[in-house]
Amino acid sequence: MNLIQVMKALSDETRIRILNILRDGELCVCELEEILDITQSNVSRHLTKLTNAKILDYYKVTKYVYYMVNENTLAEYPFIKEIIEKETMKLEQCKIDYERLKKYKSSGLNCDDLKAGKVCFCDNHME
């Protein structure tokens, strides 16, 4: 990993949005899709860039893949943590995403529920 690869990985709004909602812990791909309201292929493409730059780590549990911020990379490049903790919430879309994350977390729903279609964030309200 090198600085240029890290900077390129950080140079996209969707990837910043992903880091913003992973600030408090890991999420599954399907959770990222739902919270960010983007397609699975779009999420996967951005997750690949972030994992290739070693900004994110992941692990698999049965059919689900969970992503989290790589603490070793944050230690090596502290400016990433600064961006996640101080700059993302200055962006309106990141504020919206974080509110959706909080609603999802408080709902008690999980990946199986999402796959079964038991959640909708229409107009930023869960149904």
Image (cartoon, rainbow, N blue to C red):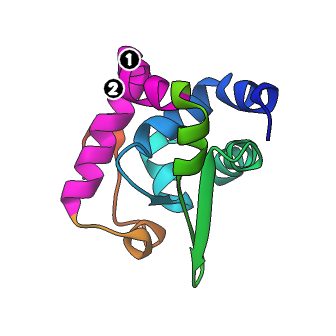
Q: Count the marks: how many?
A: 2
* Residue 14 visible from this viewpoint: yes
The residue sitting at 70% across, 50% down in the picture is: 51
Which residue matches tag 2? 95
Q: How many neighbours does mark 2 have within 10 angstroms: few (below 14), some (14-19), or many (20 or more)?
A: some
Identify the residue at image location x=34%, y=29%. Answer: 96
Q: CA distance from mark 2 to mark 1?
A: 5 Å
* Chain part drawn in magenta: 80-107
Query: Are circles 2 and 1 on residues that touch, CB within 8 Å?
Result: yes
> Whole-percent x and y of residue 103?
23, 48
Q: Main secondary structure of the magenta part?
A: helix
Toward the viewer: 68 or 107?
68
Depth check: 92 or 23 in front? 23
Q: Amino acid at mark 1?
A: Glu
Near mark 1 (Cα within 10 A), the count class, few <14, some 14-19 or many ≥20, is few
Image height of 111 relative to 22, above or below = below
Please identify the quarter of the rendering in which residue 84 is found: top left
Residue type beneath disc 2 = Lys
Q: Which mark is residue 92?
A: 1
What is the residue that sits farthest to the front in this orientation?
76
